[in-house]
Each structure stands twice: as C-alpha cells, then as structure tokens.
Image: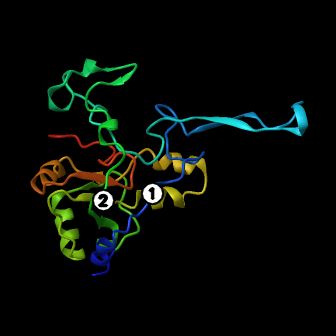
Amino acid sequence: ARAAALVRRGDVFDLGIPIDKMTPQPGDLRSPPLHVMTETGEDQNLPNGFHYADDYVVLALQGATQWDALSHVFYDGQLYNGHSASSVGPHGAVHCGIDRIAPGVVGRGILLDLPRCQGKNWLERGEAISPEQLDLAIEAQGSPVGEGDILLVRTGWWARYLAATDRDSRGKALRGEAGLSIDCAEWLGRHAVAAVAADNYAVEVVPSERRGA
C-alpha cells in the first residue's frame, strides 16, 4: 500500500552511488575516477588579489551507477537489431548509443529484494538467481511485474562491498558476485520488462555460468 501511494505521489528515488576513490572498479579494465587539481590559488600573482582554483576529472563512463548502451556488447560482428559492430568507432556509436534514451529513464520500478526473501544480508559469490527465485520474491513481496516495468534486483552485493573495511577486501568483492542467471533472459522477455538494473556491477552472475558443464 505504501509503495502504491508513493507511485501515486510521483516520488522519484535517486539510486546513484557516489563517484569517488572507492567507486567499485577492478583497476585493470577500468579504474576509479582520477581527480587532479590544476590550480589551487597558490603562487598566483593576479590583479586586485584575485585567485582561483581549477581541476578536472578523468572518469571511465562505466565508473559508477550507469546504464549500458546496446552498443556495449556485440556478437559475430553485429550489434542489437542487426547493425554492424563497425559502426562503433572512435567518435562514438552510430547505432544503439545510450544517448538515444537521453535525458533519462522514468517508469514504475519494482524492487525484488532476494536476500531479504531468503533471510540473508546478501547472496553468496557466484550464486545464479533463477526465474523461480524471482517468482518466489514476487509472491513473497506481493509485487507483480507488468509490461513496461523497470525491474530492480537487490542481491546485497553493494552492502557486502560497503561492509569491507579496506581496498584489498573490496577488491576481493569485485572478483565475484551473485546475479541473474542466463535463464532469466526468457523470464524478462515473457514479462515484457522494459529495463533491468541491479545493485551489483555486472547484473549477471560472476563467475559466468558454464553451459553444459
């Protein structure tokens, strides 16, 4: 009832995480944001006592909370909808770029809290979330998922990452996570979900599932 009331009032919840030196990045493919001060106001000899500070940030575009563009991954030389992967070049993506959804995504969000439904603080590393687990969470929470909804999956990974007390332990958390099983792809299509987001860094389970093993 409370969730329905919030939707009626049109409340919007900010799900972004801070962009800082502890942003969850492994450091090989992507690094945490680099902040450099180019001017601090010191050693400046300008008229009338004027001083200024200036800085810049070097940031991987997947450096924090973000949406993946459909041009992010491709198979057999093709992007989503049959576009050639060669259309992604040094000046950006001609097709399937994230700019196509600017200025943002707004919709009815359905949060499925998987750890809470199982009486846990978080799911374990490498735990693949099945369609059956999603159905059980929907039943337990009374949160039906409908056409065009944005599905928010809580695995507890972010809480586990924040519970780590130093960079080394947080680095270990980056080497694996619970996430959606490949079998959830059909489930999402069957429910006509418009978008899916999660509190982990890959959405899917890591390490990846090995089919037929």
One can see residue 36 in this view = no
What residue is shown with label 2?
A: 152
Disc 1 is placed on an element classified as helix
* Number of residue marks: 2
Q: Residues within 10 Å of mark 2 (few under 14, many from 20)?
A: some
- Secondary structure beneath disc 2? strand
Task: Reply above or below: 104 against 27.
Answer: below
Which residue is drawn at the image coordinates 39% and 56% (left, top)? 199
Give the side of residue 102 with respect to residue 16, left or right.
Answer: left
Quarter-of-image position of residue 69: top left
Furthest residue toward front: 48
Out of 36 and 46, give the one closest to the viewer.
Answer: 46
Residue type at mark 1 is Trp
Foreground pick, 162 / 53: 53
Q: CA distance from mark 1 to mark 2?
A: 13 Å
Q: Which residue is mark 1?
A: 158
Say which residue appears at 37% left-offset and 68% top-offset. 11
Direction from residue 61 to residue 100 in the image, left or right: left
Badge nearest the viewer, 1 or 2: 2
Type of amino acid under label 2: Leu
Q: Residue at x 43, y 48 (%)?
A: 65
Q: Position of residue 211 (x, y in %)?
A: 17, 40
One can see residue 130 in this view: yes
Residue 195 is tagged as none
Tell me the quadrant of the picture where the C terminus can be found. top left
Q: Is residue 64 above or below residue 75?
A: below
Which quarter of the rendering shows the N terminus? bottom left
Q: Are marks 1 and 2 in contact (CB under 8 Å)?
A: no
